Amino acid sequence: MHRFFADERGITDGTAYLNEEDAKHALRVLRLEVGSIVELVCAPSRYLARIESTEDGEVCMQIVERLADTEAGTQVTLYQGLPKADKMEWIVQKSTELGAAVIAPVAMMRSVVRLDGKDAAKKTERWQKIAREAVKQCARVSVPEVRLPRKLSAMAEEFAALDLLIVPWEDARDGSIADCLAPFADKKELKVGILIGPEGGIAQEEAQWLSEQAGAKLVTLGARILRTETAALASQAIVMAIRGEMG
């Protein structure tokens, strides 16, 4: 079923309108007509809706029924050490599918990629668009916030606001994600940060700062060393599975 976003007016008396971009796609590309049933996303919920009119290119929708909620109670923020090439695009897409609430690129000591100014803004805009499209594909309601790249040292206050900050690190010899989550088993809503190093990994100095200054839990993902993009997705999947968010 085709899935679209409502515009900023939201839903009033059971009526909503598609945003401009989705309206054009529905009419010009998909050639949908009055009476067509689609899925309408209007945060914090999603609905079955019927096209009532398409006058002047504006698509008016009538709500048919509310659909089941698909958002996770566990709010995961992925702090991703800036990777090379187009890996970040892939990570944003897949992290959105896994339910991440926030995706925050991090400039770390071993990051090869350096982004600032207009380049950073342009990349972030691109990543945000990818997250938005991924939401449509995976039947989510809320689009993750993709933040501008920042330095690790600028995030101490943000880390302190989390319930838990998990840092998979190749030099960690014990501790697991399951161990970290165990004390929060009875807490329905949880703010979890997951920090993943770039291709070169997390430097010793960074790991020490994270542990001593940011209260991070350094954990191992096993005997094998995972690529940065693999570690990002594996860690999120483990968190979501343990928290009962994946079936």
Image (cartoon, rainbow, N blue to C red):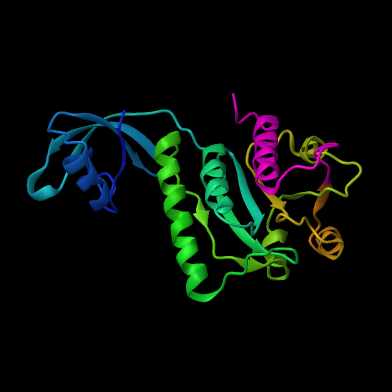
Q: Which residues are magenta?
A: 219-247
Is 43 rendered above or below residue 243?
Answer: below
Is 200 rendered above or below residue 57?
Answer: below
The quadrant where residue 105 appears = bottom right
Q: Is residue 68 left or right of residue 241?
A: left
Is 247 rendered above or below residue 221?
Answer: above
* Viewer-proximal residue among 224 and 183: 224
The quadrant where residue 82 appears = bottom right
Q: Residue at x 15, y 48 (%)?
A: 58
* Viewer-proximal residue among 130 and 36: 130
Q: Is residue 241 left or right of residue 88?
A: right
Q: Position of residue 156 (x, y in %)?
A: 72, 66
Q: Position of residue 177 (x, y in %)?
A: 78, 39
The quadrant where residue 41 appears = top left
Residue farthest top in this picture: 247
Residue farthest front in this picture: 85
* Viewer-proximal residue among 119 and 77: 119
Q: Judge whether residue 44 can be spotted in this image.
A: no
Q: Position of residue 190 (x, y in %)?
A: 66, 43
Q: Quadrant of the C terminus?
A: top right
Residue 239 painted magenta: yes
